[in-house]
Image (cartoon, rainbow, N blue to C red):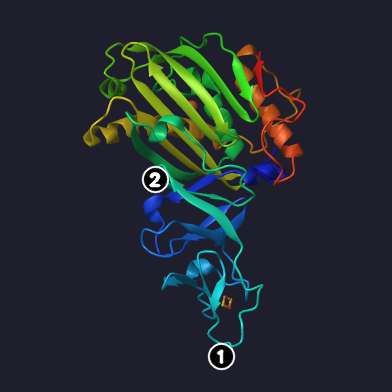
Amino acid sequence: MLVSEIPALRDHWYPVAYADAVTTEPLPVRIFGERHVVWRPAAGAPPVAATDRCPHRAARLSQGWVDGGTLVCPYHGWRYDADGRCTEIPAAEPGVPVPPRACLRTDAAGERYGLVWICVGDPSSGIPDLGEADAEGYTLIHEMMEVWSASAPRIVDNALDVSHVAFVHRGSVGSATNPRLSDYTVERDGTRLRFEVSYVAAVPELQKRNTGITSDLTSRSTEAELVEPLVFRGKLTYHENGLEHVLYKTATPIDDDTTLFCQFIARNDDPSPDRWDDISAMDRQVQAEDKALLEEIESDLPTDVTSEVHIKADRMTLEYRRILGELAERPAGAPGGAPAEEPVAVRVG
Ligand code: FES
Ligand SMILES: [Fe+2]
């Protein structure tokens, strides 16, 4: 299943840039294979997003500029306000009203967790709640935002797949001699998934400094959650000292084969800013290992669950395939959540 085969993915929110990268200078972004533009009508104003195409003669609005709170098209100077309404047509005769169809196709846009998020479909809810990411007692640290040549569902599938850690990350936090996970149960609520599992992880030198753990191997648990179809939350808890390292991974589909991958974390140990680079460096190394693998995997993720081989440890990613298959059946703009005939929450496996 490719992103373009699941129109309902358009009804969700995706980060497109860091909040401080969205200014009064219009910024082009690509999502679902389309060109969009984000900007602020004034410094510090809420972000605005629209299809990056002027309704007059198709010029790219991202080549324009902001003046007096309006976005000015670079071709003939038509001006648009934050609601997408055209407020001025310089070449029009004085007193002639603006044609009603001279308006932009705006998108829902908002800011949270230091990111600008947009929804290019029909948002059924707000920007997702990510628990610790803006909770008291946790420090939010941004680690990366980069374009990967991998499909968004494959990236999230990898995040949900804990049994890969021992192998893909054998050069960092994986322990290839400890490949087995504790037993776990997958809980499903509509398109959300959650499970909790423990396993043995390796602790390289940098990770010892980052976590305060002194042994070469440690037991840690992962509370993994599919928050939205392309948004993952994974809380790592180190049993030895209670440290919580909560990972957030978002996969914004640029197109079927390309993704804007964003990762940020929340920590409960109040790390001083001079430690942030080391903490991020470890996570970036782990992500580089995933990226190398994912960029070589085909974009098409099968949702026919009989077409692949599954073992007991794959229950989370098996359920993810079912969710994507169900989403593909749903037209864009349809109400979210579980199909009506299903119970609200089910336990799988
Ligand atoms: S194309 Fe934008 S004003 Fe003409
Ligand atoms: Fe990984």
* For discs 1 and 2, the disc positioned in front in the rendered view: 1
Q: Residue furthest bottom?
A: 93
Q: In the rendered structure, which disc, 1 or 2, sits on the residue that comes first in sequence?
A: 1
Inspect the image, locate mark 2, and give the three-letter code of the amino acid beneath it. Answer: Gly
Ligand 1 occupies quarter:
bottom right
Where does label 1 land, which residue?
94
| Residue shown at the point (61%, 44%) measured from the top left | 257
Q: In this rendering, is residue 99 above or below 259?
A: below
For label 1, count other residues whose C-alpha is less than 10 Å away and answer few (under 14), some (14-19) or many (20+).
few
Give the image quarter of residue 345. Answer: top right
Task: Name the element at disc 2.
Answer: loop
For label 2, count other residues whose C-alpha is less than 10 Å away and answer few (under 14), some (14-19) or many (20+).
some
Task: Name the element at disc 1.
Answer: loop
Is 333 or 214 nearer to us in this picture? 333
Q: In this rendering, is residue 47 above or below 202?
A: below
Is 153 or 331 nearer to us in this picture? 331
| Residue shown at the point (70%, 27%) measured from the top left | 322
Q: Which mark is residue 131?
A: none
Residue 147, x across and y down, in percent:
49, 46
Is 213 or 296 nearer to us in this picture? 213
301 horizontally vs 68: left or right: right
